[in-house]
Image (tube, rainbow, N blue to C red):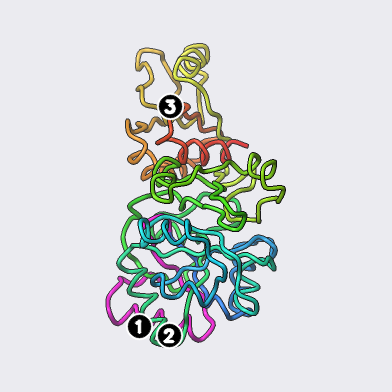
Amino acid sequence: MILSANEATIAQAAQALHDGQLVGMPTETVYGLAAHANDEAAVAQVFLAKGRPADHPLIVHVASVQQVPLFAVQVPDFAHNLMAVFWPGPLTLILPRRPGVAAASAGGQDSVGLRCPSHPVAQALLKACLALGVQGVSAPSANRFGRVSPTTAAHVQSELGPDLLILDGGECDVGIESTIIDCTRGAPVLLRPGQITRAQIEAACGRAVLDKDAAQDQVGQSAPRASGTLESHYAPRAKVVLMSAQDMARKLQALGPHANNLGLWSALRPDEGAGLGAGVVWRAQPATAEQAAHALFGVLRELDARGVQQIWVQQPPDTPEWEGVRDRLQRAAA
């Protein structure tokens, strides 16, 4: 059931989490499927509901930096700097896990992903949970594993059914998942790009950000498993194909009236004089990375709902601010 977020429904959701139930919660990135992070039975329900492998870790959401010592130890100085600059916000830090806590949430690893979301409903829910003794909630995206992440409460209900308690906090502002930085190997390592860019991370912590593969060569340790880093992820039912605007125009011209059951997400509107089939649905790709990230998952879901067989997407610019959107599209097309 979808409940409009207010003081009473947030208290109801916090009690449900305390009691080992699952809750759909809004964040500024995407909606999450929340469970008490230290309740292994509740966390197991998350993996079951999503169809997610149990060794694929979940991100633990906390109300503030004050909860970090409850879940993590040996936190490096550069990680503290990142928390000071970007929390609350769309940044997840992989840190050495305190023994005996959140083992199921961490997928059995000795590291744990922590994030402090900025969405006001998420903050209110996490603080209400704290009052009940729930120090953090594990909350992967509230969708079936590997599919398109939800950015509205209705998306969550369509994925996971009417019985789940879902707090409606409106449409997510950011629209793609958090940037993930591994802080367990002595240097900041980018595991998943997001709205917060490499340059912003480097400026905040005063350190160069390493790529996952480069870090393994330099540090000699492989990256811990983290959310959203599989080659194929964020995928709709329709096949996603990335191409340049020129290739898209050329292929559409070649298909002409035979173009059908096709979704397009491109900055340029297809030539209306090309005589395209009636089953071609075009949506405008925004001009900025921030606007495109906000729209991305909603567009993929809409085109899927229209029953198109393929979704052709104009390749975003190869510039730093578009890295998060490019990452999601490349995984959706894998």
Q: Identity of the amino acid at label 1?
A: Ala
Q: Circle 3 — which element?
A: loop
Q: Which residue is mark 2?
A: 15
| Number of residues whose C-alpha sits closer than 10 Å to that of mark 2, classed few (under 14), some (14–19) or many (20 or more) | some
Mark 1 near mark 2, Cβ–Cβ under 8 Å? yes
SS state under label 2 = helix
Q: Which residue is mark 3?
A: 317
Quadrant of the image containing the N terminus: bottom left
Up/down of 21 relative to 208, above or below: below
- Name the residue nearer the viewer: 79 or 32: 79
21 in the magenta segment: yes
**In this figure, which residue is indicated by the disc labeled 1?**
11
Front one among 43 and 194: 194
* C-alpha gap between disc 2 and disc 3: 45 Å
> Which numbered disc flags the more N-terminal residue, 2 or 3?
2
Q: Which residues make up the magenta segment?
A: 1-30
Q: Earlier in the sequence, mark 3 or mark 1?
A: 1
**Residue density around tag 1, few if under 14, some if 14–19, many if 20 or more, within 10 Å:** some
